Image: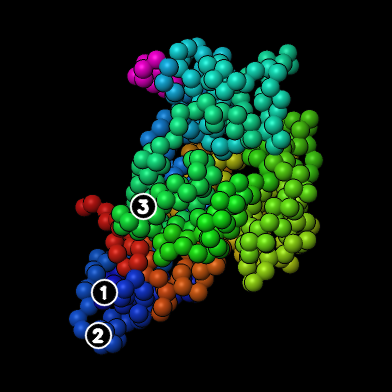
Amino acid sequence: MQLWTNGTIYTMREQGEKAEAILTDNGKIVEVGSKEDLLAGAIGQPEIIDLKGQTLFPGFVDSHLHLIGVGETLLRLDLSSFRSKQEVMEAVGLKAKELPEGEWILGDGWNENQWTNPEVITAAELDAVAPNHPVYLKRICRHAAVVNSIALEAAKIDRETPDPEGGLIDRTPAGELTGLLKDQAQDFMIPALPPIEEEYIQKSLREGLKHAWSLGLTGGHTEDLSYYGDFTRTYRAFQKVIEEEGNHFRAHLLVHHQVIEDWHRQGHSFLSGSRYVEFGAMKIFADGALGGRTALLKSGYADDPSTNGVAIHNPEKLKQLVYKARQYDMPIAVHTIGDLAFEYMLDAIEQYPAVNAQRDRLIHAQILNEDLVKRAEKLPIVLDIQPRFVASDFPWVVERIGEERMKWNYAWKTLLDRGIACAGGSDAPIEPLGPLLGIHAAVTRTNPLDPSGTVYGEDQCLTLFEAIELFTKGSAFACHHEHNRGILEKGYAADFTVLEKDPFESDVNDLLSLAVGRTVVDGKTVYLAEK
């Protein structure tokens, strides 16, 4: 047994509720209460865990990320911090000098909306700095990538190649390829890219886990199973790294519809798995992203009325996919950024509702309107939101969507006030991993890099308690674990996030630098800050 005491302990059962101590055993909370009472009720003498004045919460859980992808960004060329195209070009050029001729240059995270001149990268520009290397650079949203001419040739993509369903090959008015591939068009690159080895997947997962622990995450709802070839070996990586190697983390695996048949044939079911690695809902993509104007809108983009985005699947195919999930007794988890994509999914859920008290989740839910919110209120769904998108998408998203259409967009406070369940995630590596960043964005609705401190949608700011709920109770509810995770309660998991200071007693901007002192999964410390 362990007795956790000498700190500030927030149960998250109710706002402001604290406890003096927690007694744990075998990965579970035995009791929450006063130190004296818990010691009196303990069997034998428990190990005393001295919190040394730090602040303990139920374990923070990211409700939407790509954990292997997080690890990949730590191993590959990370372009997410660059503030100009020139910086990206310099990094690619430097990498070209380091690597043997002909070896692939792979990178992630470029974002033209962070640049003074927001023009996307072209194949010609990459050719100039890396003439002897194939180059493949994913945009921050991962709904677009840019490649150079050698890469296009390796993938056998030329000006005669037709656009795939749910994707676009970008071209000049004269029909020449620009090197930009959007959504499903990126799949054309898969046969040409270097093969993904099992050790690479496992190494990326280890790196992602270590990074997650250091940020206070005890678990995450992660979607990785369709991106690294065979479903079995990707699942095997989670089993090996988390279970066999003892790197404990609550990995709730969304199952992409493209691998659902393999998953089903192997006898898996919703919430089956183990103590640390379990299967969640069937993942579907309904549209793209706002950055590349591929999120599916009901009307054209304000800054480019010629397009209203990309439907990854038509409405009938979406309904077929939802029907398939129901045949496998599964809820669905659907990427829906645009309002038309959201409408398509409501139509499908209403026709094929979830069964057995299951809850579907609609991920992102950024662009909405009053009618869609009213319909959502009546359904057993969770909106899986990423508060950090406010910091990344404003102010440019206003110009992209149009000021007159913004009232119901990124409207987290309205959604909560209307009684719609919400969970908090990062979508890392699209956004930086770290629940405190998401909590800060939810409370302040500011961009930390904006010296003016502009607040975007002040009426939609959450309280600190509401924001922390997204990453505790909200994440637990989204994955059907509200009965044993998300709060500090007898019988619940002994998963804790320990912060060096109390955020309720600090300036809200201190969240940006607030250090994690300890991360605990199943009663075991997986991360302890160095002193």
Q: Is residue 496 left or right of residue 184?
A: left
Q: Residues within 10 Å of mark 3 (few under 14, many from 20)?
A: some
Q: Residues within 10 Å of mark 2 (few under 14, many from 20)?
A: few
For the residue labelled by badge 2, is the local secondary structure a helix, a strand or a loop? loop
Q: Could you say which disc has been placed on residue 262 in the image?
A: none
Label 3 vs label 2: CA separation?
34 Å
First along the sequence among labels 3 and 2: 2
Tag in front: 3 or 1: 3
Q: Is residue 398 left or right of residue 387?
A: right
Q: Amino acid at mark 1?
A: Gln
Give yes or no for contact between labels 2 and 1 (Cβ–Cβ under 8 Å).
no
User: In the rendered view, how is the structure colored?
Assistant: rainbow
Q: Amino acid at mark 3?
A: Lys
Give yes or no for contact between labels 3 and 1 (Cβ–Cβ under 8 Å).
no
**Residue 401 at least partly seen:** no
Q: Position of residue 472 (x, y in %)?
A: 48, 64
Q: Could you say which disc has been placed on residue 43 in the image?
A: 2
Q: Quadrant of residue 96?
A: top left
For the residue labelled by badge 3, is the local secondary structure a helix, a strand or a loop? helix
| Residue under the point 40% across and 79% down | 490
For the residue labelled by badge 1, is the local secondary structure a helix, a strand or a loop? strand
- Counting labels gives 3
| Magenta stretch in the rendered image | 91-101
First along the sequence among labels 2 and 1: 1
| Residue under the point 23% across and 68% down | 50
First along the sequence among labels 3 and 1: 1
Q: Amino acid at mark 2?
A: Ile
- Per the image, the residue denoted by label 3 is 240
Q: Residues within 10 Å of mark 1 (few under 14, many from 20)?
A: many
- Per the image, the residue denoted by label 1 is 2
Q: Main secondary structure of the magenta part?
A: helix
